[in-house]
Amino acid sequence: MGLSLGEDKFVGTFAAVYPEVSDDPLPDDFTLDSPLEQLSIDSLGRIELIGLLEDRLGTRISDDSLRNAKSLRDIYLAAVTGVDSA
């Protein structure tokens, strides 16, 4: 069972790493339900994003979760279930 990972912490961490995975500015109106395409994150950017989030949040996100993610919330939910409880 994973540890608690609040949405605010996830969103803040995402906003901090976003410039490393996209050349576009982060939209002011982004939410957890924003489609990844709207956030200008391509397939390589997704891989980089996951690695950065895993490192900063102490979590593991499965390859299946990454492949199936349509929105930022999908990645958040995968991170919540993968947070290392050790």
Image (cartoon, rainbow, N blue to C red):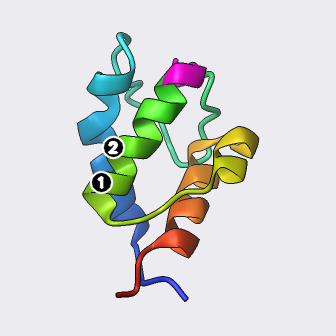
Please state the extent of the stretch shown in magenta in the rendering. Answer: 39-44
The residue tagged 2 is 52
Q: At numbered mark 1, what does the secondary structure look like: helix, strand or loop?
A: helix
Residue closest to the eye, 19 or 32: 19
Tell me the quarter of the picture where residue 58 sits. Answer: bottom left
Q: Indicate the amino acid at tag 1.
A: Asp
* Quarter of the rendering occupied by the C terminus: bottom left
Pinpoint residue 4: horizontal percent, then vertical percent: 42, 82
When the figure is inspected, residue 13 is found, relative to residue 6, above or below; the finding is above
Tell me the quarter of the picture where residue 55 sits. Answer: bottom left
Pinpoint residue 59: horizontal percent, then vertical percent: 41, 65
Pinpoint residue 82: horizontal percent, then vertical percent: 52, 70
Residue at image position (37%, 50%) is 53
The residue tagged 1 is 55
Pinpoint residue 27: horizontal percent, then vertical percent: 41, 24
Query: In the drawing, does residue 33 fall left or right of residue 11?
Result: right
* Quarter of the rendering occupied by the N terminus: bottom right
Residue at image position (33%, 43%) is 52
Q: Indicate the amino acid at tag 2.
A: Leu
Query: In the drawing, does residue 66 fall left or right of residue 51?
Result: right
